[in-house]
Each structure stands twice: as C-alpha cells, then as structure tokens.
Image (tube, rainbow, N blue to C red):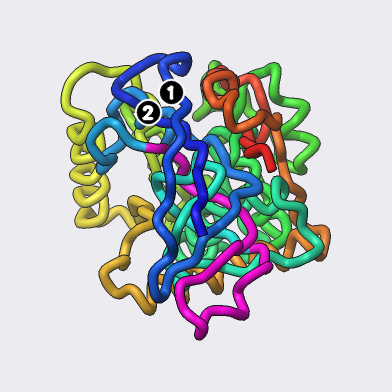
Amino acid sequence: MSITATEIVLPGAVEPEGLVTAHRELPDPRRGQALIRVEATGVSFAEQQMRRGKYYDQPAFPFVPGYDLVGTVAAVGSAEDSALVGRRVAALTKTGGWASHVVLEAADLIEVPAELAPDAAETFVVNGITAWQMLHRGAKVRAGQTILVHGANGGVGSTLVQLALAAGVRVIGTASARNADQVSALGATPVDYRGDVVAQVRALAPDGVDAVFDHVGGPGIVDSFSLLAPGGTLMAYGTASTKDDAGNSRLPVLRLFARLMLWNVLPNKRNAHFYNIWAGQRRATAFRRRLAQDLTAVFALAVKGDLHAQIAARFPLTQAAQALSLAESRTVTGKVVLVPAQ
C-alpha cells in the first residue's frame, strides 16, 4: 500500500516559525514492522531543546521531531503481527513522531486502553514513563513521604504530582505565581520559583524532603540537593536552565553528571541520580518490557481516574510552529498536543 505522510521537518537551529511542512511517500512495513496512522503526538521539552540544537544526542539536521505518539495500526509487514491491525497503540520514538503516518517496529508498540482518547493517552507516554520510572524505580517513593517537584505545572511535572499523590505521597511543587492555582488544583502545595525556593520549602518541610525531581539543572541543582532529608534522593532529568546558552550542548549535561557522581561518593547520606529514559536500551528485550510495564501501569491509573490528562492545548499537526511557541511560553499547565488531520 502506498501512503504519503505529512511530516513537520526541523531544518536547523531555527525559531518555531522555521519549521517546514513536507510530504513523503512511506515504504511498506517490512517483517516485524507496522504502519501507524498517527492520532496524536506531543510537544515535549526535548523538541524545545532540539530546535536550538541543544538536545544531548539529537540527530543531525534536518529531521522530523516528535518524541512520542498514539495512533492506530493500519498495516503490518508480516502475518504474525496481523492481530495488531486496527489496534490503538502508543510508542516512544525520540524523533519522527510529528507526522501523519509512521513505520515503527511492532515490538515497540504498547496497547492503549479503549477507555482513553488518543490525545489523553498521548500526554501519558513520555511524561508518564518518565514520571513513573523516576518515582518508583529511581527514588522509590513510599506513602507518607514528602517530595519536591520542580515545574509542577509542566508536562512531566503535573504527571509526577498526580502519580505521587496516587501513591500517598505529599507533594510540594514549584511554579510561577500565575500557575499556583493550577498546581494547587492538582493537589500539590505551590511554591513560587521566582522567590527564595529553599526558604519556602524548608518552611513546609523543616526536616527536608525525601526526593527532589529537578529538570532545571544549572546552579540551582545545589539547592535541590541541599533540601534532601537524610536518605533522600535527587532525581535530575534535564538542564532547562542552559537551553539558551551558547556553546557545546553536551557540556551542561556532562557538568551535571560530574556533580552528581561527586555527591554520590561523598559521605552525605543522600543519593543523586540522572534519569535517562533510554538507559538500558542496548538490552532491547528487557528495555521494551520495562517500558510496556510502566506505561501500562500509568494507563491503568488513568482509566481508574487517579490520573487525569493535562492537555494544555490541541493544534493541528500543520500548526506545529504555534504549538511549539505556546509550549515554550511556560504559561500553560500540562502538554501541548498535535493532532494530524484524519
């Protein structure tokens, strides 16, 4: 079957309006592959870094961004995968998701419950896997503990808040003053990140917090580590504070790695880790199994009603520039979703 896909191409380090809409005929899926009709894809912080050429291991320009997607299997490359046809699935892609159709490995597809709409399910893919793994595989949070979530109104942050609350954990969340009400509505105690964060958090948790989730990096990571209670865990998962800095995009990440490693060898009774969703990818079978287990657990909480999709806005795929600009404005709660025309 011949399918012409609509794709959004990132041609170089450009402003959002520099994105290009292109059309490309896709090859038929080979054995072990599936053709997906994309129903929703999202704008994550990764794309915001990629358009600046600042994502740690992004491909060379030009390429199609899109870290994750939800869609329906339209065709498969072999009879052994025929049961997938017509099923709604999710996939973690890193790049390539901003398209009307994609060809992916069938083994990378994770079934989406029928109770979840495509745009709602999309908000839980990279955000849900990231939040679940940091909470339960990294920090190993327990009921009754207290955590600090930076950027609690963002895509990952709002998911972290909800998953933590579902686990019986108290949450303090940083955000701007204008987003404080949204953070409160999620169930967290808001803290203004433009103020003295350390003083505000210590007033709420005098003995320190059990975990901090920090996507900001930069000098503020020292404050995050200082707020940990004995035995606490810092989960760093980004360097947002340096996204506009000139120079080598890898240096901020390498500096952060070095600082975390140093903290771990010092006798401070606290832990520091850098979270990478792609860690362990070389062991493909175990990696895929872990992703499927964790995203399925997140989907189950959403179906149960313990986790609610935080959709900041929906845009047609061809309005990716406007969607990216809104996501970068830091004025919204949740995730900006792109919906290809069907």
Q: Residue at x 60, y 64 (%)?
A: 73
Which of the two discs, 1 and 2, labels the residue nearer the N terminus? Answer: 2
Q: Looking at the picture, how far across and down is residue 6, in whole percent?
A: 51, 37
Cβ–Cβ under 8 Å for marks 1 and 2: yes
Is residue 20 visible to us here? yes
Tell me the SS state at disc 2: loop
Task: Quote the CA–CA distance across marks 1 and 2.
Answer: 7 Å
Q: Is residue 68 shown in magenta?
A: yes
Q: Residue at x 41, y 75 (%)?
A: 32
Asked if residue 29 is positioned above or below residue 223 in the image, the reply reads: below
Q: Looking at the picture, how far across and down is residue 310, in whole percent?
A: 71, 40
Asked if residue 331 is positioned above or below residue 306 in the image, the reply reads: above
Asked if residue 159 is positioned above or below residue 201 in the image, the reply reads: below
User: Which residue carries the number 1 mark?
Assistant: 20
Q: In this rendering, would 24 be left or right of 174?
A: left
Which circle, 1 or 2, is nearer the viewer?
A: 1
Q: Looking at the picture, how far across and down is residue 56, in whole percent?
A: 27, 39
Q: Amino acid at mark 1?
A: Val
Q: In this rendering, would 269 be left or right of 34?
A: left
Is residue 272 visible to us here? no
In magenta, the rendered stretch is 64-88
Q: Residue at x 59, y 23 (%)?
A: 319
Q: Looking at the picture, how far across and down is residue 131, in whole percent?
A: 54, 53
User: Which residue carries the number 2 mark?
Assistant: 10
